[in-house]
Image (cartoon, helix red, strand yellow):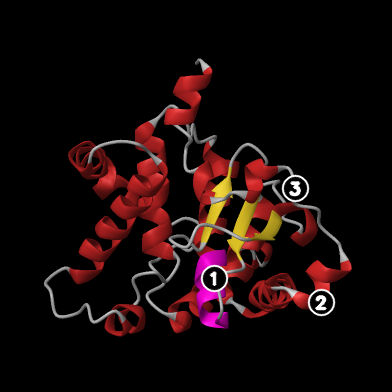
Amino acid sequence: MDQTEQQEEDYGYNLFPERNSGKFQKGSIAESLFTFNHKCQVMLQFAMETSPYAKLLLGAMKSSGCAVYKDRHFSCEDCDGTVSGGFDATSSQIVLCQNNIHQQSHMNRVVAHELIHAFDHCRAHVDWFNNFKHLACSEIRAANLSGDCSFHNEVSRFNFGLKKHHQECVRGRALRSILAVRKVSREEAEKVVDQVFDTCFNDHAPFGRIPHDKKDAKFAYRDFENRDRYSANL
């Protein structure tokens, strides 16, 4: 691929300017005390310690041989105003958009969403850049399992009352995520989402169920924690 083609297909990196600027230096006093970064780091730590979505995903990744470390695998950065986070497959790092995440509930959802991408990257060797179906599948799973389409969140967006609303929310959010990071037509993106939707929507790993809300996620996390108890007592 020549330089012009690389610029035309940036895989969404233009949404995360600090990924390319070379100017971002972590650990400065100003970064720690006087910017959004400190708040982002605090909310991230709280999400990792208290969110049942995040706790289950972190446990599942560790069990799969892909342990996640806060300082290595998360980065709080300034991003384009249209995104809240992203998964950088080239560095196996989750980007959290510190200028766009201002509430803990939002941080919890973003962390869960991106951890699902990281989990898929660990377990399935996803070809993010060359296989459009792989990308679509992971976006469907992330929208389905992260709480993005919970009843509470949809009501807050004034979206409710439709038949099969959860499925349509998942489909719509997956489609928007794809269009944000790939230079393809809406028709092409819709076609790929339709091709993989049923299979990927019904893949609930590692939750074992669709966690429609925090209560569901807590039950899923309890089941995950107790997954070896039955066989241990045989």
Label 2, label 3: how many angstroms apart (C-alpha)? 19 Å
Give the SS element for disc 1.
helix
**Residue 185 occupies quadrant:** top left
Give the SS element for disc 2.
helix
Q: How many marks can you see?
A: 3
Q: Name the residue nearer the viewer: 223 or 105.
A: 105
Disc on the earlier residue, 2 or 3: 3
Describe residue 189's horizontal placement relative to residue 230 as left or right: left
x then y, percent, for residue 82: 43, 61
- Residue drawn at (28%, 41%) of the image: 196
> Tags 2 and 3 in contact by the CB under 8 Å rule?
no
Describe residue 37's horizontal placement relative to residue 168 as left or right: right
> Tags 3 and 1 in contact by the CB under 8 Å rule?
no
Amino acid found under the numbered disc labelled 1: Tyr
Q: Name the residue nearer the viewer: 163 or 93.
A: 93
Disc on the earlier residue, 1 or 2: 2
**Residue under numbered circle 2:** 33
Amino acid found under the numbered disc labelled 3: Lys
Report the span colored magenta. Answer: 103-111
Q: Main secondary structure of the magenta part?
A: helix
> Tags 1 and 2 in contact by the CB under 8 Å rule?
no
x then y, percent, for residue 133: 35, 35
The circle drawn on residue 24 is none
- Residue drawn at (75%, 61%) of the image: 70
Describe residue 141's horizontal placement relative to residue 224 as left or right: left
**Residue under numbered circle 3:** 23
Q: Which mark lies nearer to you, 2 or 3?
A: 3
**Residue 62 occupies quadrant:** bottom right
Badge 3: how crowded within 10 Å, few (<14), some, or many (20+)?
few
- Say above or below: 2 vs 161: above
**Residue under numbered circle 1:** 53
